[in-house]
Image (spheres, rainbow, N blue to C red):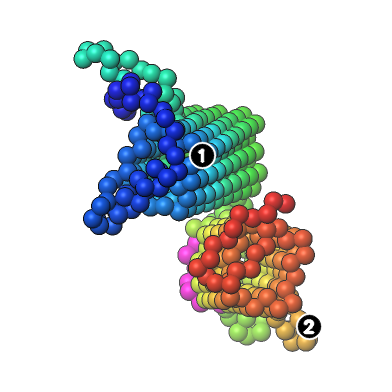
Amino acid sequence: MSALVNPDDIHRRRAMDQRECDLAVRRHELFVLGRAGGQRANFAYRNLTGLNLACKNLSEADFTGAIMVECDLSGTNLQRALLFCANLTKAKMVRANLTRADMRGAVLKGADLTAAELFNADLREGAIFTKRMASDLQGVAVDTDPTDMSRAKMVNANLTQANMAGAVAMMVDFTDAILKGANLAKANLKNATLEGADLEGADLSRADLRGAVLRNANLYGATMIAADRTGCDETGALTDLPRGKPMTMLRESLHTLVRDHGSWIESGGANGHLLDISGFDLRDVEWPDHVLLTSLKAKDACIAHAKFNGAWLQASLFEGADMRGADFRNADLRGSNLKGANLVRANFEACNLAPMVVQSGKSLVTRLDGAILRHARFQRCQLVHTSFRAADMRWTTLVDCDTSGAEFEDAIGLQLLARPDQAPAEPTKA
């Protein structure tokens, strides 16, 4: 795709001052609201270098070919905006909303898009052409390369279903970014950091992943045909390959084993059997709501995205388990051991993680020591004396929780929020 422009417009690069820009923004916001005096903002080919556009509503505004170097667009609404071949080098776009924005051919070198919303954004290549004569089309050197986001920061950005085919994304930091169903075919991701990124169902065919970091990334259902993964670090990545013993190796059906475990608990061990799924890959299992799994053993198991809503999981063993994206809402996890577990984006809303007092009178503390809890959500939880020592809590939400006596020694990125409508700020680096 290309844009046809007049060369005189391209070279008209007088820098816009902040006052002129603010006036255009105010008119655009009136336009969005359908009020008198409103006018759609047209910043095409203008020089906006260094201007402050933070927290404005610029949805559907036209920035085609604009120079926006080091602009502040933090928290700005740019839904469906035209950023075709715009130069956004080193722009600050933290938490910007770029849903369905046209960013073909844009330059995002060194830009900060931490926690930005880029759902269904178009980041394919784009080129601008000038028309000198009726029958003479000639390309000009105005951002004609593929979308270039080299060294950009996209930590925790939402790029679900974004089209990044052929994009240049060398050394981009995609840590914990959501790239579900994204098109990254032929993309240059050399030395990119995709640690903890969710690439489920993404198309990475013929992508250049040399030297990329994919530790603990979710590659389930991703297409990797002809991708160059030379020197790629995929330690702990979740792929289509088994992450443990298959369910077929269980001595009976899981339904029967769960029923027998319930009998074992209710009879005090006189009937049934303890359920031990340690080392098994049960990521696709459908667990019933409010299931009785007290004292479950699931050490090093892969139960990613498990739904344990309202489950009884007291004194269970989940040490080293992969439970990324698990749903523990309203569950009882008192006295459980979740040391070193992968709990990225797990939901613990209204969960009880307080100590459990056993028959001997001993108190079992719930332990999440060394657990990976990035983006996990703890809301209205009982966390009395819960141990989070050395846990990775970057971007973790803790709101309206009772943390009396809780241990957070050496935890990374801890923040306690007062209200559920607050969002965690950028975490402190370890």
- Is 272 in front, or is 422? 422
Classified by dominant secondary structure, the portion drawn in magenta counts as loop
Q: Earlier in the sequence, mark 1 or mark 2?
A: 1
Quadrant hosting residue 314 = bottom right
Seen in the image, is 140 located left or right of residue 305?
left
Between label 1 and label 2, give the one nearer the viewer: 1
Q: Residue at x 32, y 39 (%)?
A: 42
Q: Position of residue 170 (x, y in %)?
A: 56, 32
Residue behind mark 1:
50
User: What span is colored magenta in the figure?
Assistant: 285-293
Q: Position of residue 132 (x, y in %)?
A: 28, 15
Quadrant hosting residue 263 = bottom right
- Residue 362, disc: 2
- Is 16 in front, or is 81? 16
Q: Residue at x 38, y 52 (%)?
A: 57
Q: Is residue 289 magenta?
A: yes
Asked if 375 appears above or below 272 in the picture, the reply is above
Q: Is residue 16 magenta?
A: no
The N terminus sits in image quarter:
top left
